[in-house]
Image (spheres, coloured by chain):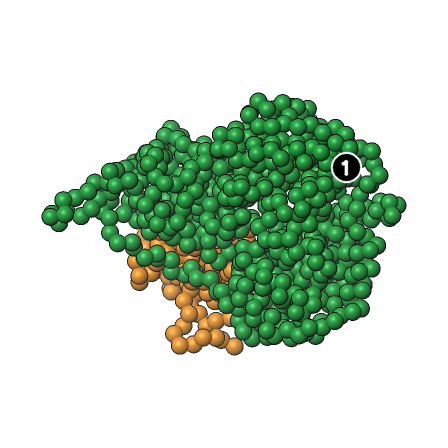
Chain colours: A orange, B green
Amino acid sequence: MEQKHIISTLVQNKPGVLAHVAGMFAARAFNIDSLTVGRTEDPSMSRMTIVVIGDDRVVEQVRKQLAKIISVVKVQDFTGQDIVIRDLMLISVATPPEKRSEILALIEMFRGKVVDIGPKFVMVEIAGPENKIEAFINSCRPYGVKNVVRTGTVAMARYGRKRAD
Amino acid sequence: MSDNTISTDPQSSEPIRKPGSQIILDTLIELGVDTMFGYLGGVILPFFDKLYDSPIRFINPRHEQGGTHMADAYARVTGKVGVMVATSGPGATNLTTGLATAMMDSVPIVAMTGQVRTELIGNDAFQEADTTGITRPVTKHNVIVKDPSEMGRIIREAFHIASTGRPGPVLIDIPVDMQVAQVEVTSPEKIKLPGYASRTRGHSRQISTAAAAINESERPVLYVGGGVIIANASEELRKFAQKAHLPVTMTLLGLGSYDQTRAESLDMLGMHGAAYANYAVQECDLLIALGARFDDRVTGKLKTFAPHAKIIHIDIDPASISKNVHVDIPVVGDAKTILSELTKQVEHRERKKWFSRIAEWKSKYPLRYDTAATTIKPQHVIEEIYRRTKGDATIVTGVGQHQMWTAQFYKFNRPRQFVSSGGLGTMGFGLPAAIGAQVALPGELVIDIDGDSSFNMTLGELATAVQYELPVKVCILNNGYMGMVRQWQELFYGKRYSCSWLKNPDYATVARAFGAVGITVEKKEDVAAAIDKMLGENKPCVVDFRIDREENVWPMVAAGKSLDEMDGLDIFESMA
């Protein structure tokens, strides 16, 4: 069954590593839904959070092929684990004067933060799991969404709890 | 060499400094490298200057691609790492076919390329190419040197990566300024490869489960790939197969891992495998895959592959397990240790019914051809070579019909005896690979059984063989076609031989022009004498066999068909 899998990959923080990982996905025709990279607490290591859509067989191959890359240190499939998932989004929403208070209430409801205000638009910062982000975009559509920038998913396993049943 | 280094006054506390190029050479020697292949060019000259008075034996191919195939075959016949060096830009891009060939067949190569000066990288400098970018998908690992003090460690890591786990090619891109920079010589830095560790000992419970399945099996087949040869596990394989009493079939790259003259051998399986091997796989109740990867040329249609079998897969690469075929009992690790462990746990079983079924197939569908023909049949040439070399030569091939006929009609009896491009199917591999093998095996008989089209691609390397006095023998099965392509056009494209016809040169004349011996054979009755003459030569020698032009390779499992749906068996029956 095809589903989203979040694969957390610890890699050496070296030039060319992202190209190795992205190249492997392209060469083996695996689909990346999102990919984020950033340094970890250890400056010699980076963390890639990769969201892949596929059935179990495909995702098992993805995991094994990732582990085969020399500069990849550790691969974890978060599927079925108790994890915290976040996307961060910046979104510009049209704010006609008569709708302004309505929109601000909506932002409040989603626990978003206004980070910039212009005469016609407001820029909002919002973080959360993907479905919350999607829901916010949909709620803003009637007013007019000018621009969306998203980080893609990052995830971390909850401390001390390995598996959710 | 020491005169190239900057020595310091022992009284002073100044550290010893050497140029990066000297560090490269010193590290190679420290790693036991005594032979290298490569081609010069501008930005690798500092390193070549250091080679000038080094003890390393250096072979210049006529093209970088040839050099990689030489290093590849050197590695295949010795088990050591093959070393190749080239310049930037076109030098590096010419390596890619050789690297891809080695990658597909898991051959340990370390390739080093020169690169333009660090500050020019990205500026489209003369002979600049993004070498690490271009070679990334065709190497096990690649790296560019950005700090000359890391040179020694990077080279040691490259050798370690190339030769351990599932071996493969590693490329090191070295900007020219890194070769010139003076580096402080420190004690060898340890290799730092977090996350790179391959499991060598199989999981003991998995091994016991596998042994139990083997002991229970009525109709087992052992399916052996090149991994067994890489693991130097042929002796362990022999003991295991003989103790448990198992029929053994091999992939193209597995040939030589098990003595084909023994009764348990089912020879090669797959698209052009022996019918008895393919039938056995389709009827077996247990398939034991050993260092093999269920390639599409082996399995035919996946859905109907080995339909009654439980599958055990023993492989060092976890990513090979359940990639193409669902595996019931995976065992990840080194074939040598796993086989020794398995041998302790398996019991001898007669399996009379199964072996007599196999014997039936063997007698009904042997590999055969029209021996009564008056033309020169390519299979006849190979059988003669086999007879006249007493089955003992190291055999190299190009890619195509001649490769399949060689795999079918030369019976290999030892590992590393057969060298061929399996996974990538690289035409032009034969001659340079034979040269690389001959470099590794001085005084031994190395024969390239080649096709005319394959040979055409890299025949310039004859000059290399002549220059270095490497007495390789080349037997061209010359049909004036791209034979395998023509066979497919005959069978699947209504005999429309689009662009597969070749006007070839007279190879004997070509050979003589290079300073080699050239022989042409046009009659069947001259085949044996020509082979004897070739074997008597101590120079490179090319024999041009003008074979039956439209001979096909049989049997054949057409692409997308099941392994037991073989064409060409009726042709055999009419010959019986």
B289 over B137 or under it: above or below? below
In front of the other: B541 or B477: B541
Residue A105 visible somewhere in the drawing: no
The part of the image, by quadrant, that contains residue B501 is top right
Residue depicted at 40% across the width and 46% down the height:
B33
Residue at image mark 1: B377
In front of the other: B541 or B296: B541
Residue depicted at 41% across the width and 61% down the height:
B195
Among all residues in the image, which is located at the extreme front? B536
Q: Position of residue B551 (x, y in %)?
A: 77, 37
Q: Position of residue A160 (x, y in %)?
A: 40, 77
Left/right of residue B153 with respect to residue B343 in the rendered view: left
Q: Position of residue B471 (x, y in %)?
A: 55, 35
Circle 1 — which element?
A: loop
Type of amino acid at the residue the image marks with label 1: Lys
Residue B388 visible somewhere in the drawing: yes
Q: Position of residue B436 (x, y in %)?
A: 52, 40
Residue depicted at 33% across the width and 44% down the height:
B24
Left/right of residue B72 with respect to residue B365 in the rendered view: left
Residue depicted at 77% across the width and 33% down the height:
B524
Among all residues in the image, which is located at the extreme left? B11
Q: In the picture, which quadrant includes the N terminus of chain B?
A: top left
Left/right of residue B145 with respect to residue B465 in the rendered view: left
Left/right of residue A39 with respect to residue B484 in the rendered view: left
Q: Residues within 10 Å of mark 1 (few under 14, many from 20)?
A: many
